[in-house]
Amino acid sequence: MRIVPFFAALAFYICFSLANTESIVFKVPDTFSPAPQPIADENEPLISLEGTNRALKTFDAPVDSQFDIELRDLSPGDTFFAKICWTAVDPIDITSLGYSIKPDYTARGGHWQDAPLRFFLSFEAKSNSYPLFSKPTVPINISVSAMRMGVPVDLHATIIFMTLLTGLIFIINRHYKLYNRFKNV
Ligand SMILES: *[C@@H]1O[C@H](CO)[C@@H](O)[C@H](O)[C@H]1NC(C)=O
């Protein structure tokens, strides 16, 4: 089905032209062995995908310094699509968007071997205005969704809709020969 990538591209284009966004696709290694649930730290930025394949959360990201968000409950071997969205009111650029996997040496009394792993998404919100942006933080939406058939799950409904619409046009065209009708107008 070559039509799926085409509509995926179209849907992406439509979504992306409506807001300021940056995105990244990443694969969790098959061998990823996540750290057991740590003691909940309310202050640590965290997105959990427990029992779901997509999540959206709003954070107050610091301006001009690196921001790390831990992603929890990712299934090993899965590919994910993360999207960062902010309003045009805040004159910032998102730079150095990336991810990292860090061993958690605190989890097993400081043992280096078999240290469980933690997965982080990171970026920097850089002010791009002059005079410099005065707010210390900016609200930023981060959504993470699993990819299925090369497409993020939160776009599947859009793609199904567009595929049905295309099918409908095709059927109507076969019945009514739209091209010939218009040609002879
Ligand atoms: C962030 O998410 C909230 C809640 O879903 C939504 O109301 C808001 O419009 C979003 N903001 C941006 C910039 O996407």
Image (cartoon, rainbow, N blue to C red):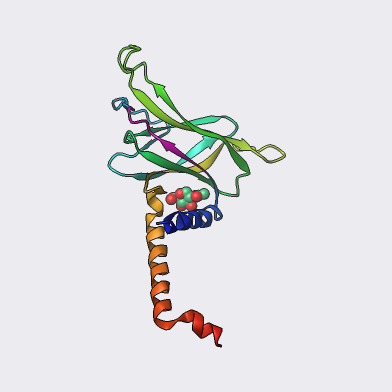
The N terminus lies in quadrant: bottom left
* Residue closer to the observer: 66 or 149: 149
User: Which of the 4 quarters of the picture holds residue 143?
Assistant: top left
Q: Residue at x 36, y 45 (%)?
A: 54
> How far from the left and from the top, in percent, is residue 150?
40, 47
Residue 23, how many percent across, how many down? 50, 43
Residue at image position (57%, 29%) is 65
In magenta segment, residue 39? no
Q: Quadrant of residue 43?
A: top left
* Span shown in magenta: 23-31
Q: Compared with residue 184, is residue 70 higher up or lower down, i.e. above or below?
A: above
Q: Is residue 77 above or below residue 143?
A: above
Disc tally is 0
Is 37 or 131 nearer to us in this picture? 37
Spot occupied by residue 50 in the image (x, y as percentages of width and height): 30, 39
Task: Quadrant for the C terminus, please.
Answer: bottom right
